[in-house]
Amino acid sequence: MRFNPLVEKFKSYTTVKGSYGIWLNKNENPFDLPPEFKWKVLKELEKIPFNRYPHITADPLREKLAVFLGVNIDNVVVGNGSDDLIPYIIKIFDGDHIVISSPTFEMYSFYAALEGIEVVDVPMDERFNLGNIEDHVEGARAVFICSPNSPTGNVHSREKIISILETGVPVVLDEAYVEFCGSSNMDLLQRFDNLIILRTLSKAFGLAGIRVGYAVASEEIINRILRIKSPFSMNVLSMKIAEMMLENYEIVEDRVRFIVAERERLWKRFADVAFPSEANFLLFRADAYEFLLNRGIVVRQLSGRLKGMIRVTIGSKEENDEFIRAFEEYLDGIRC
Ligand SMILES: *Cc1c(COP(=O)(O)O)cnc(C)c1O
């Protein structure tokens, strides 16, 4: 039995959570909803009858998302976070393996292993560019590409993504951080019916706690997912909050602007150890995990090929200032 790596990793943190102040390890948005807006949301939730089942396939939310994205409702499926959709996507295709490109989001491999499906890794090169994935697509269920990629922060080349799509293999393009980079490949859905775009409301939307994610793809793929997905799996409260956030997207845009400006501020400050990023976090070539933890700042400690590096979420102004102070102290310590 293989255990969820995130549960193992975060178990220890949750037991000591009270004693740490600054959480920059999960790429969460540093801001909760603005208080006036949150109050409006709560008033709306009060009107919802809790004794009734939600819509069986969450159509009111699918409809809002479809309008927001400029696609048809039949091209959208929602899940309890986009994580929830990954096992379904793996199940609907045939083939003996999935293809990933490390270092990347760990959940693709986790869910494949859970299904007993082999994972073929075509690692990125030293500049985090995708390798010859096209040579490994034969017999593959799907290729998983994350862009902007976590934990590296870079965007993958559109030409490369197109070249992989042209092989005809199902391609899952995880755009969890797309709002922070401003260039999506969603438009490729018009050219390729083997493309599945995966998105979440957990990062830019700041709704990690309510658990809503979605996939956009051809009607045929969405139907195949709906056919095996548990009915009524989306709860009425989360769906309502997601719908209201989509209607107030300027709140998201404001925060994205702030986070991107802060990311650039931190990147410039530490340009000699920071990789450029188009997401809401930075990858640093610095083994500062323990040092920062001792100062009450929790970041993500990386392993494997990225051993000795940390991934740091962009926080609020105060949190980032605190991180800058502590990280400078760390760098001063190793320089002399
Ligand atoms: C955060 C994240 C997700 C999804 O998170 P959910 O909270 O399950 O929607 C998916 N992919 C990547 C790369 C992420 O970082």
Image (cartoon, helix red, strand yellow):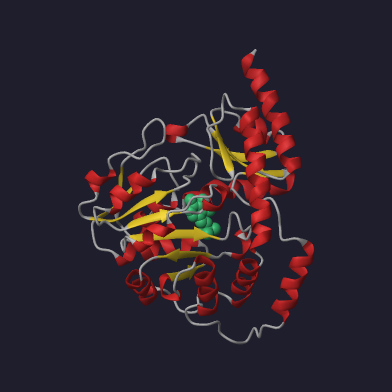
Task: Residue 52: give x, y in percent of width and height.
Answer: 59, 87
Q: Spot the residue most to the top.
A: 336
**Of the pair 10 and 267, the residue shown nearer to us:** 267
**Of the pair 130 and 94, the residue shown nearer to us:** 130
Task: Residue 160: give x, y in percent of width and height.
Answer: 33, 44
Q: Report if residue 10 is visible in the image.
A: yes
**Of the pair 137 and 160, the residue shown nearer to us:** 160
| Residue 129 against residue 90 in the figure, above or below | above
Task: Residue 195: give x, y in percent of width and height.
Answer: 35, 59
Q: How many numbered discs, if any? A: 0
Task: Residue 221: give x, y in percent of width and height.
Answer: 34, 69
Q: Report if residue 119 is visible in the image.
A: no
Asked which quadrant contains residue 31, the reply is bottom right
Asked which quadrant contains residue 41, the reply is bottom right
Q: Spot the residue most to the left.
A: 138
Rendered-image quadrant of the C terminus? top right
At 51% from the left and 77% from the top, the residue drawn is 58
At 63% from the left and 51% from the top, the residue drawn is 256
| Residue 261 against residue 247 in the figure, above or below | above
- Left or right: 157 in relation to 287: left
Rendered-image quadrant of the N terminus? bottom left
At 69% from the left and 48% from the top, the residue drawn is 17
- Left or right: 124 in relation to 9: left
